[in-house]
Amino acid sequence: MDKLIAIGGGPLSGKVRISGAKNAALPLMISSLLTKETLRISNIPHLHDITTTMELLGQLGVKLQVDETLAIEANASEVESVIAPYELVRTMRASILVLGPLTARFGRAEVSLPGGCAIGSRPVNLHIKGLEAMGADIKIENGYIKADTHNKRLKGARVFMDLISVTGTENLMMAAALADGITVIENAAREPEVIDLADCLNAMGAKVKGAGTDEIVIEGVEKLGGADHRVIPDRIEAGTFLVAAAISGGKIKIVDVIPRQIESVLDKLREAGCQIETGEDWISLSAPVGKLKSVNVRTAPYPAFPTDMQAQFVLLNCIAGGTATVIETVFENRFMHVHELQRMGADIELDGNTAVIKGVGNLFAAPVMATDLRASACLVLAGLVAEGETVIDRIYHIDRGYDCIEEKLAQMGASIRRVPGHYFSQQSA
Ligand code: EPZ
């Protein structure tokens, strides 16, 4: 397994273009299953999860082409299978998003239960409850979700989401697009990625209203057509690079970003003492001259502070000049980066879903291990501000969700390189 070596150095500054959002691109690609016509999606990020999604769609019989701009053309006119196998689903939970479209268009689907992941048990009961409300018969057998409409069209239904789930909302929105009648999703997720999917579905001929609010109304149609859709920028990648500049005393301009989509993060960076300016599709940040101020953070569904930025702000508070709490309310086990940061000299007390962080000014290099996508980005940034050479292991997590992270950080002046896993065995021999 490859590792990343990050060497603590000076300020991270420069200009970075933000890639398309992973969590928008995945449901957008999967929505191609809803139509016989070709769906073209541009601004796709170059990530392992995108490759996995292409593999999954290919196995279902979707014809895929990638053009010179990395845009993907998907055509599901000859889908041969409705089975999403465990081997693929276990590597990428978002595979669950094929359940709604397959059931809606083909009346059947067999999708492996995704199982938990490092950050939590991640149940999919709300996805299943919604499809059952629309008339699908669902059984769980041998680790697979087996949906069957008995050759009937799904029916519109009113579905209340007990918990706010982004992929839950997206799965049901896609299924409802082809259902007979009106579906109302209450307590829906309001994330920008949900809006992006609704915009694409409407371009395909769907009738989705209210995306971005907590009540989405979908009037089902008989069939959907093709479309040409550009993926929105990745607000979490944007936030990650802003934190990189903030914690290293740097100055950054990020372009191809939608500032209002990370307002909660910008608010916290200002509170920490950063100077921030925004334009229509850009954000510039200058770190404070002295120490950053510690900032209290509480994660919650959009538009509140995103859980995917929690690890990065635990790190910011590690080197800020005070004490702060970070409360994680979305996932039950999303503090694994804390133990790694403690090994680098951080002063963090964990108490259930609350981390109390006392700023220690600076961290020291140590071999660390990535555990989940966003935690791994936090460890890379920690290595770039710590004294010495930090080796980050299991960086496949980072490759799933960040497009060319070492190249983009190197553009900002970072000293970072990827080495093959056996590099160290040779070194030690
Ligand atoms: C999406 O996950 C993102 N993934 C996550 O990003 C992100 O952290 C999360 O939303 C929150 O913003 C994608 O969009 C592909 P959930 P999602 O499992 O919607 C409970 C990343 O790093 N729940 O629905 O799949 C669940 O336990 C990833 O890019 C149920 O109880 O999140 C959790 O507490 C990590 N039953 C909460 O809802 C269900 O049926 C949200 O979890 C579904 C969810």
Image: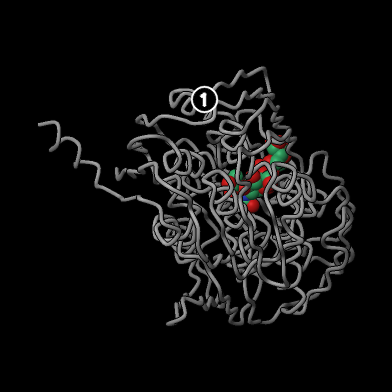
Nearer-the-camera pick, 400 or 162: 400
Against 124, is 401 above or below? below
**Residue drawn where x is 71% and y is 29% of the image:** 327
> Mark 1: is the Cβ under 8 angstroms from ligand 1?
no
Q: Could you tell whether 217 is left or right of 256 in the image? A: right
Would you name the residue on which mark 1 appears? 346
* The image quarter in which residue 367 lies: top left
**Residue drawn where x is 57% and y is 30% of the image:** 318
User: Where in the figure is residue 126, as x and y percent of width and height?
Assistant: 75, 43
Of the 4 image quadrants, the one containing the N terminus is: top left
Q: Residues within 10 Å of mark 1 (few under 14, many from 20)?
A: many
Of the 4 image quadrants, the one containing the C terminus is: top left
- Scheme of colours in the image: one colour
Against 149, is 6 above or below? above
**Residue drawn where x is 82% and y is 44% of the image:** 161
Image region (quadrant) for ligand 1: top right
Instruction: Report the amino acid beneath label 1.
Output: Ala
Total of numbered circles in the picture?
A: 1
**Residue drawn where x is 19% and y is 42% of the image:** 423
Residue 266 seen in this snapshot: yes
Residue 146 seen in this snapshot: no
Q: Judging from the image, what secondary structure is the residue with disc 1 in?
A: loop
Nearer-the-camera pick, 130 or 381: 381
Q: Could you tell whether 366 is left or right of 98 in the image? A: left
User: Where in the figure is residue 165, as x and y percent of width and height?
Assistant: 74, 46
* The image quarter in which residue 117 lies: top right
Nearer-the-camera pick, 257 or 139: 257
User: Where in the figure is residue 31, as x and y percent of width and height?
Assistant: 64, 67
Q: Residue furthest front?
A: 289
Q: Residue furthest left?
A: 429
